[in-house]
Image (cartoon, rainbow, N blue to C red):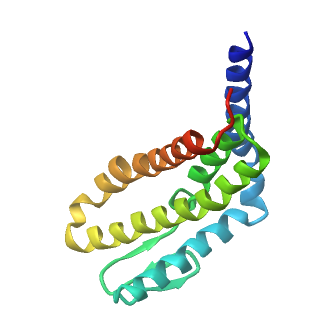
Amino acid sequence: MAFSRSLVRSWLVLGATIGGFLLVQPFLIYIGFVSWANHLTAQMLAGLLRLLGAGGSAEGAYVRSEFFSLEIVAECTAILPIVIFLGAVWATPATTRSRWSAVLMGVPAIVLFNLVRLVSLIYIGYLAPRWIETVHLLVWQPLVILFSVGLWLWWAERWRTAL
């Protein structure tokens, strides 16, 4: 019975985290957090493109390179994958210290993975423009979510406390 209570608690915490985020998302848009995240993602992407020699620049949420340009919208940021990861971490029976170590390791890893996704979309937009929508929607979006869940599973296997 203790195992099923723990399992129910975990699912409730995960559901509450994701559901809570969806409820406060309009407020986050209203106060400008989402716009800030879009601009920050655009700046990081432009910087990475410059490092790769693609001449990236950002103006607001628009990113331009020598090859291709795109606009960063809320779904292009790492916000939702991070929320899923955080919800899963907080739903896992573990010490507070191990949870914080997961956050400190996981959030930057998810952001970096998302930037790799965006860089690849810039190059796909240049080299195979007819494939960009397919790769964007059917390949990369699920991969980012799977990466977040996989990262959580990796952490949970190594750091969680015994049920």
Nearer-the-camera pick, 111 or 67 = 111
In the rendered image, the quadrant that contains the C terminus is top right
Q: Is residue 25 visible?
A: no
Whether residue 153 is situated above or below residue 65 in the rendered picture: above
Whether residue 60 is situated above or below residue 147 in the rendered picture: below
Nearer-the-camera pick, 28 or 18 = 18
Q: In the image, residue 92 lies at what x, y percent?
A: 68, 36
* Number of marks: 0
Whether residue 154 is situated above or below residue 66 in the rendered picture: above
Residue at 53% x, 41% y is 153
Whether residue 130 is situated above or below residue 57 in the rendered picture: above
Residue at 59% x, 41% y is 156
Residue at 47% x, 62% y is 114
Instruction: Answer left or right for 151 relative to 20.
Output: left
Q: Is residue 18 visible?
A: yes
Q: In which quadrant of the rendered view does residue 4 lie?
A: top right
In the rendered image, the quadrant that contains the N terminus is top right
Toward the top, the furthest residue is: 1
Instruction: Answer left or right for 104 relative to 73.
Output: right
Q: In which quadrant of the rendered view does residue 124 lie?
A: bottom left
Nearer-the-camera pick, 12 or 32 = 12
Q: In the image, residue 101 lies at what x, y percent?
A: 68, 56
Instruction: Answer left or right for 38 relative to 142.
Output: right
Q: In the image, residue 47 lies at what x, y percent?
A: 49, 84
Q: In the image, residue 134 lies at what x, y percent?
A: 29, 52
Residue at 64% x, 53% y is 102
Instruction: Answer left or right for 142 relative to 33.
Output: left
